[in-house]
């Protein structure tokens, strides 16, 4: 059986290949290991192999892992949907939040971010495929929302995040990813702290890199299929 450490090397090679095809430097792309449902010991293995960024979707599960791995210098990213009653714990324990999609959530994160910690890095989630079942603001709403968020203290706008519609149609994939990159470049001119375009997962990572992603969120390709477990959100 291939080990998690070997999977990390394989994913790194895929990132390098995609970067070369796009005439980009591999160092421009950050690998975010999506570690939901995975045990703390598995994260520790990846950390020992050099992985530093980990993304979690479920708050209670992630808090347990953050505590178990407190001896490591991990950059913790919250990437799941955010309920208002979860914002304090997220603001207190994470370095990044990728799933901000409305002003109320940004306001609560700003208010609840401990003053002893650096500003919270946030990405605005965009519903780029305009799916009614998905979280995220519409592309047309992003500019106005970011202007409001930019006035808030104790947070730093780092970029945009998207989960395009799952499809095997490469043209459709590229269309959504190209639109995200175009939106990112336009908004970046207004918000100089924006340096992150978080898009691309195990199934479309290489295409996403070719279309301008600076951060890819990889779970299955690193850890294998997710186990089915019951949990609190």
Image (cartoon, rainbow, N blue to C red):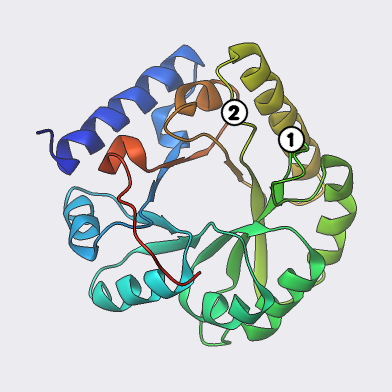
Q: State whether residue 231 is above or below residue 178.
A: below
Residue at image location 73% in from the left, 77% down from the top? 153
Q: How many angstroms separate mark 2 from mark 1 (CA)?
A: 10 Å
Place residue 100 in its image quadrant. bottom right
Residue 104: image quadrant is bottom right
Q: Residues within 10 Å of mark 2 (few under 14, many from 20)?
A: many
What residue lies at 82% left-to-right and 44% top-to-bottom?
138
Q: Position of residue 121 (x, y in %)?
A: 59, 63
Q: Are marks 2 and 1 in contact (CB under 8 Å)?
A: yes
Q: Position of residue 81 (x, y in %)?
A: 61, 60
Q: Is residue 221 left or right of residue 206?
A: left
Q: Is residue 166 left or right of residue 31?
A: right
Label 1 environment density (alpha carbons within 10 Å; few <14, some 14–19, many ≥20): some
Image quarter (top left, top right, bottom left or bottom right) of the N terminus: top left
Lower sequence index among marks 2 and 1? 1
Who is closer to the viewer here, 145 or 162?
A: 162
Say left or right for 198 vs 177.
Answer: left
Secondary structure beneath dot 2 equals loop
- Residue 211 - label: none
Residue occupied by mark 1: 185
* Position of residue 44 in the picture relative to residue 12 (left or right): left
């Amino acid at each position: 059986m291939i080990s998690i450490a070997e999977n990390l090397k394989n994913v790194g090679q895929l990132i390098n290949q995609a970067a070369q095809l796009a005439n980009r430097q591999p160092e421009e792309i950050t690998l975010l290991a999506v570690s939901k449902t995975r045990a703390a010991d598995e994260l520790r293995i990846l950390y020992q192999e050099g992985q530093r960024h980990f993304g979690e979707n479920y708050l209670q599960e992630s808090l347990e892992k953050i505590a178990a791995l407190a001896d490591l210098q991990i950059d913790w990213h919250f990437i799941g949907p955010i309920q208002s009653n979860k914002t304090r714990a997220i603001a207190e324990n994470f370095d990044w939040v990728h799933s901000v999609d409305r002003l109320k959530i940004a306001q609560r994160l700003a208010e609840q971010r401990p003053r002893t910690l650096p500003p919270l890095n946030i990405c605005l989630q965009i519903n780029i495929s305009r799916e009614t079942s998905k979280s995220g603001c519409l592309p047309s709403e992003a500019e106005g929302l970011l202007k409001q968020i930019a006035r808030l203290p104790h947070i730093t706008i780092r970029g945009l995040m998207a989960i395009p519609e799952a499809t095997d149609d490469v043209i459709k994939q590229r269309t959504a990813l190209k639109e995200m990159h175009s939106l990112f470049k336009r908004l970046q001119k207004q918000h100089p702290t924006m340096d992150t375009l978080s898009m691309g997962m195990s199934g479309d990572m290489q295409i996403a890199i070719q279309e301008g992603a600076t951060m890819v969120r990889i779970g299955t390709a690193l850890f294998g299929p997710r186990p089915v477990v019951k949990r609190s959100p």
